[in-house]
Amino acid sequence: MKHLLFLLILAPNFIMAQDCTLKNEKDRFNQDPRLTTGFVSLGGGNDKFLLSISADKKEIDYFFALDNSVMCFNDISRVMVTFVSKQRGNFKNGGTTNCKGYFHFVFPNQPNLNPNLTNLSQKKIATIQFTDTDNNKKILTLTPKDQDAILQLTTCVLAELEKLRVDTWKPKQ
């Protein structure tokens, strides 16, 4: 009976096991290691978008590519993430100016995680609202499946951050 109770207590740990398949790339400029989830298709219909989360020793980059979008984003464009708990996070565009629907928000890769990044790894996202250069808004409503996928992708990347912060460069002697 004790063994059965012990197995029941451990069961959620096995159910929540994650399939973390991150791609290991080299940064094109400095040849440092860079991990990425690759682009994952999320949403459906008019709310379809691609998401890629990448990390290197300096930063964590969330890259959204809105499907069939002509929204223009520049350095003053914003995104508001509303979590299921009604808490919100606001992020500015960290990418280049474009009219292709590409939006980045970037966090520094530091030992003490940014509170907004911690929220992204622990709370499910209900909606994502993009505001472009002309103050046009596009709201993406996420399904429970998409919410779980974003949580899983974020958790997978965050689990590898400390390894990326290790500086492997050594001077020749």
Image (cartoon, rainbow, N blue to C red):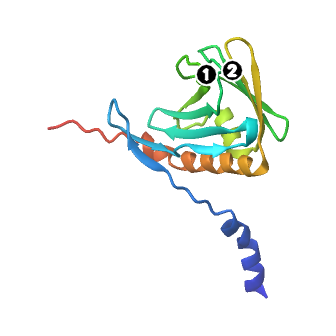
Residue visible at 71% across and 11% down? Answer: 134
Q: How far apart, in angstroms, are the residues tagged by discs 1 and 2?
A: 6 Å
Describe residue 87's horizontal placement relative to residue 53 as left or right.
right
The disc, 1 or 2, on the residue closer to the chain's N-terminal end is 2
Q: Position of residue 42 (x, y in %)?
A: 67, 44
Residue visible at 74% across and 13% down? Answer: 135
- Residues at marks 1 and 2 touching, judged by CB atoms closer than 8 Å: yes
146, 5: nearer the viewer: 146
Residue visible at 44% across and 40% down? Answer: 165
Q: Position of residue 24 (x, y in %)?
A: 42, 48
Residue 142 falls in which quadrant of the image? top right
**Amino acid, disc 2:** Arg
Residue 16 falls in which quadrant of the image? bottom right
Residue extending farthest to the top is: 134
Residue extending farthest to the left is: 173
**What residue is shown with label 2?**
78
58, 3: nearer the viewer: 58
Residue visible at 74% across and 40% down? Answer: 45
Q: Residues within 10 Å of mark 2 (few under 14, many from 20)?
A: many
* Element carrying mark 2: strand
Describe residue 158's horizontal placement relative to residue 138 as left or right.
left
* Element carrying mark 1: loop
Please determine whether, in this image, residue 24 is positioned above or below residue 86.
below
Q: Position of residue 154 (x, y in %)?
A: 61, 45
**What residue is shown with label 1?**
93
Q: Residues within 10 Å of mark 1 (few under 14, many from 20)?
A: many
- Quadrant of the frame with the N terminus: bottom right
Q: Position of residue 149 (x, y in %)?
A: 67, 50
**Amino acid, disc 1:** Asn
